[in-house]
């Protein structure tokens, strides 16, 4: 228990010491002092990187490390400071904004380091400049708000540190999307758009150019990693794949840099998206040229795409044709002249000003003997005689972002202090109250530009699309070739002037950077196994499927009445097939049908002309005439099967065929029975003919035909044949046919015809050797043999024939059986009547019978 008591004694001692010294304020560590400052009623802080590099030392952690030594003075930090000073001077001189209240400023150097940024931010929040104060520790003289920092990583650390104190941090150049998280960074706001919008704008621009296979280099910090993560997410949504995404930082070893170079050289993509800053690319340019990494199309973020110093250093045109996003250009009257007037810098901070002057004019405030390559500073050097980063005003949109941040603070103070003609109080508002009012501030600059923050503390995102081009004087210049406005509808956000863009190889043709060529219409994409979705094979659509767009992921099935064309890119109406009068087969069958009907009519005429001759009278002229009439109908009914099926033609063709054939077979059956009865009548004592005379013959024909009529009526009543589009026989064709309706009805009609034909054949076969006139029973036997043979072979042929050939088979069966009956029964008689009239006599006929 002794260690516990010892610990309690230590804690109590610390508490008692604290109570005894509550009136003294002691700052731990080294004090941080502003580089530029000016007193005022309310102080605005500023943190900018006045240096771009620092001295790297090995820390042993055994002794206290030496103070950080910043190197390489960066003029951009001075330009940002001048922008802040300009805004404060303008506000202090304004009669309408914060009248009677003066704003002061304290501007610190962060050296671009997170640790230094947090240190100077805490110095601004604390407000005590001395290490020890005899004054009682009351509320410190803290700043109202802090303008800065430039780098996202530094801003993240600072915002997280000062967030609990509700001190606003308004950044002009920190674009990391992560800073929009108000749970982590509740007091962070910015006047530059978030990378959330920039990343999506870059992805939309890349997709607009058709680049679906790109590489990426990102700064290995929060800015680069977060920005690239947002870009990757947006790119995937737009169908863009990253072949590689490589981290890079300026302090990387040569081995790490070489791995990056090897990755780029082995890649197939021709577009590189750079989410880095200008210093990163400055150090990479020589390495890229050394390894012949040229001719790539670079796509840049706003951190480097419009940096003139980088463009000047790109002597080998590595970045020629680069395209990217920059903050939309704006102007503030008087700012440019103020920035170039370096007197305010001298007034605000003499110590830093001397160093600034030496670097600006490349001279030294030392004795000539100590100088080597530099000149002696006279103090009368003119800024108009030099041209360097400080005199370059290409970053004016960023300077104006600093200006807008200061004015946001001023307008918020104006509202909270209740300023009218003058401000009734100069008391500094409570930080939390000020922060909440700052979030909803909405004002216009003197140039008419609206300034406000959304719920995440971000402004509206508006970008210019910048293209690196080379002028006729071989000078790099940044040409605006488009605009992006996130406040517009999705399809209208990005506008580009394609004709004015110069690409990496100085051509007007958009470079190609795809893993696989676009799949043309008529194909679909099939992702290659183990590769990103942008790497795919183009698979032709199957029959009956189409794709009518490029890079379709699937083929769409055509409707039932449509089929894919040969290119598989369009559904076309299926070809309709039916036995037409216009095609060869239809014409042939029609001609044969008509010829058969004509021959039948000619025979009918012959028989009618010679109706009183022995041959005609001996063969039952009444049944012969009826048979010829029915045969004519049989020939003609085949025509109803030809042509486009309709409701009436479907019902007519089958019923007409069934009834006319039954009428025909009934007549043949009657003639057969007459032959049998005639033979019986010649026998002594037979009186059979009186039982099958003409009345009975007509009645039998009528009865047999009536049965078929009843079958057909029932068929039509219950389930009649109707037109039908058959899509099952051919995939690419529609067969127009007559659906049978009731198969039972159809086969009942055929079965009844077959029954009568079989009966007729049996009777004729029995009477084939009877001594009839001209042996008609034998001719009937032949005709019925042909008839039965035709219809027996018809059944399998009908069932197996596809499409219009089914109809052709049925017509052929009708014509073949009709011609069989016609020729076998009537051709021998016509031969005698026309060519052998000497045999057409009663004597000849009786003589033949006597011989038999």
Image (cartoon, rainbow, N blue to C red):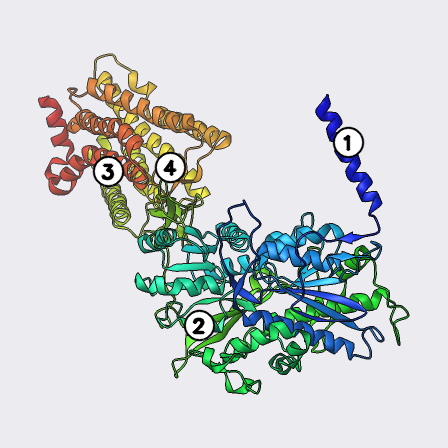
Q: Which residue is mark 4?
A: 728
Mark sitting on residue 157: none
Mark 4 or 3, which is nearer the eye?
A: 4
Q: Which mark is residue 9?
A: 1
Q: Measuring 28% from the left and 47% from the top, which residue is drawn there?
A: 586
The percent position of residue 276, horizontal first and vertical second, equals 48, 59
Name which of mark 3 and mark 1 comes first in the sequence.
1
Give the labeled residue for mark 3. 612
Q: Secondary structure at mark 2?
A: helix
* Cα distance in 3D space between marks 3 and 1: 155 Å
Mark 4 to mark 1 CA distance (whole Å): 98 Å
Q: Residues within 10 Å of mark 4 (few under 14, many from 20)?
A: few
Which of marks 2 and 4 precedes in the sequence? Answer: 2
| Label 4, label 2: how far apart the Cα atoms are | 69 Å
Q: Quadrant of the N terminus?
A: top right
Name the quadrant containing residue 818: top left
Q: Are marks 4 and 2 in contact (CB under 8 Å)?
A: no
Q: Are marks 4 and 3 in contact (CB under 8 Å)?
A: no
Contact between labelled residues 2 and 3, with CB atoms less than 8 Å apart = no
Question: Residue pushed farthest top?
Answer: 685
Residue 386 placed where, x, y %?
Answer: 50, 84
| Residue at x 28%, y 25% (from the top left corner) | 757
Q: Secondary structure at mark 3?
A: loop
| In this rendering, the label closer to the viewer, 4 or 2 | 2
Q: Nearer the viewer, mark 2 or mark 1?
A: 1
Q: Which mark is residue 311?
A: 2
């Amino acid at each position: 228990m002794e260690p516990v008591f010892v610990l309690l004694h230590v804690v109590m001692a610390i508490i008692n010491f604290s109570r005894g010294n509550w009136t003294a304020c002691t700052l731990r560590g080294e004090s941080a002092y502003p580089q530029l400052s000016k007193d005022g009623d309310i102080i605005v802080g500023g943190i900018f990187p006045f240096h771009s590099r620092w001295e790297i030392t090995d820390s042993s952690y055994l002794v206290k490390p030496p103070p950080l030594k910043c190197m390489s003075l960066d003029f951009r930090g001075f330009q940002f400071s001048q922008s802040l000073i300009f805004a404060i001077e303008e506000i202090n001189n304004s009669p309408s904004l914060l009248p009677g209240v003066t704003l002061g400023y304290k501007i610190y150097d962060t050296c671009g380091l997170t640790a230094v940024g947090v240190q100077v931010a805490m110095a601004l929040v604390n407000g005590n400049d001395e290490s020890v104060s005899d004054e009682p520790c009351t509320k410190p003289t803290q700043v109202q708000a802090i303008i800065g920092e430039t780098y996202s990583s530094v801003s993240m650390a600072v915002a997280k540190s000062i967030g609990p104190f509700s001190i606003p941090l308004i950044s002009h150049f920190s674009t990391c999307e992560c800073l929009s998280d108000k749970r982590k960074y509740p007091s962070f706001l910015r006047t530059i758009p978030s990378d959330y919008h920039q990343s999506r704008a870059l992805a939309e621009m890349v997709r607009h150019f058709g680049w679906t296979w790109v590489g990426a280099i990102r700064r290995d910090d929060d800015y680069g990693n977060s920005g690239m993560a947002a870009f990757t997410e947006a790119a995937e949504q737009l169908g863009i794949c990253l072949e590689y995404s490589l981290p890079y930082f300026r302090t990387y070893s040569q081995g790490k840099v070489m791995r990056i170079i090897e990755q780029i050289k082995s890649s197939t993509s021709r577009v590189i998206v750079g989410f880095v800053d200008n210093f990163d690319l400055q150090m990479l340019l020589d390495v890229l040229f050394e390894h012949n990494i040229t001719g790539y199309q670079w796509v840049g973020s706003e951190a480097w795409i419009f940096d003139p110093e980088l463009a000047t250093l790109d002597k080998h045109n590595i970045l020629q044709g680069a395209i990217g996003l920059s903050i939309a250009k704006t102007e503030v009257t008087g700012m440019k002249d103020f920035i170039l007037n370096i007197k305010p810098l001298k007034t605000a901070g003499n110590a830093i000003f001397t160093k600034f002057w030496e670097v600006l004019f490349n001279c030294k405030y030392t004795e000539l003997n100590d100088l080597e390559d530099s000149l002696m500073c006279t103090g009368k050097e003119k800024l108009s005689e030099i041209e360097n980063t400080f005199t370059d005003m290409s970053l004016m949109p960023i300077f104006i972002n600093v200006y807008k941040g200061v004015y946001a603070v001023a307008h918020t103070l104006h509202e909270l202090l209740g300023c009218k003609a003058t401000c009734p109080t100069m008391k500094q508002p409570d930080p939390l109250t000020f922060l909440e009012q700052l979030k909803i501030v909405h004002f216009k600059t003197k140039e008419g530009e609206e300034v406000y923050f959304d719920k995440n503390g971000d402004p509206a995102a508006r970008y210019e699309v910048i293209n690196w081009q080379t002028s006729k004087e071989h000078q790099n210049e940044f040409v605006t070739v488009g605009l992006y406005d996130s406040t517009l509808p999705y399809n209208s956000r990005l506008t580009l002037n394609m004709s004015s863009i110069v690409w990496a190889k100085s051509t007007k043709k958009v470079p190609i950077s795809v893993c696989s060529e676009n799949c043309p219409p008529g194909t679909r994409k099939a992702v290659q196994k183990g590769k990103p979705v942008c790497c795919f094979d183009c698979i032709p659509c199957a029959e009956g499927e189409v794709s009518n767009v490029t890079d379709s992921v699937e083929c769409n099935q055509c409707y039932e009445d449509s089929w894919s064309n040969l290119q598989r890119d369009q559904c076309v109406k299926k070809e309709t097939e039916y036995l037409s009068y216009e095609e060869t087969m239809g014409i042939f069958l029609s001609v044969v049908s008509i010829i058969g009907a004509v021959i039948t009519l000619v025979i009918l005429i012959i028989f009618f002309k010679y109706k009183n001759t022995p041959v005609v009278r001996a063969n039952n002229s009444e049944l012969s005439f009826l048979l010829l009439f029915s045969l004519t109908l049989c020939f003609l009914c085949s025509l109803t099967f030809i042509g486009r099926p309709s409701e009436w033609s479907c019902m007519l063709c089958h019923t007409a065929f069934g009834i006319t054939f039954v009428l025909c077979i009934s007549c043949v059956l009657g003639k057969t029975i007459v032959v049998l009865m005639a033979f019986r009548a010649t026998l002594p004592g037979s009186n059979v003919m009186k039982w099958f005379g003409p009345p009975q013959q007509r009645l039998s024909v009528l009865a047999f035909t009536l049965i078929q009529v009843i079958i057909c009526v029932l068929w039509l009543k219950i389930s009649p044949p109707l037109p039908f589009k058959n899509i099952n026989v051919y995939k690419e064709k529609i067969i127009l046919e007559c659906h049978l309706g009731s198969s039972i009805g159809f086969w009942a009609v055929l079965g009844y015809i077959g029954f009568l034909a079989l009966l007729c054949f049996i009777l004729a076969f029995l009477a084939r050797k009877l001594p009839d006139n001209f042996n008609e029973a034998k001719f009937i036997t032949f005709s019925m043999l042909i008839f039965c043979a035709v219809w027996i072979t018809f059944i399998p042929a009908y069932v197996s024939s596809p499409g219009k050939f089914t109809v052709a088979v049925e017509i052929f069966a009708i014509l073949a059986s009709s011609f069989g009956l016609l020729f076998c029964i009537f051709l021998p008689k016509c031969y005698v009547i026309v060519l052998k009239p000497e045999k057409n006599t009663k004597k000849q006929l009786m003589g033949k019978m006597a011989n038999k």
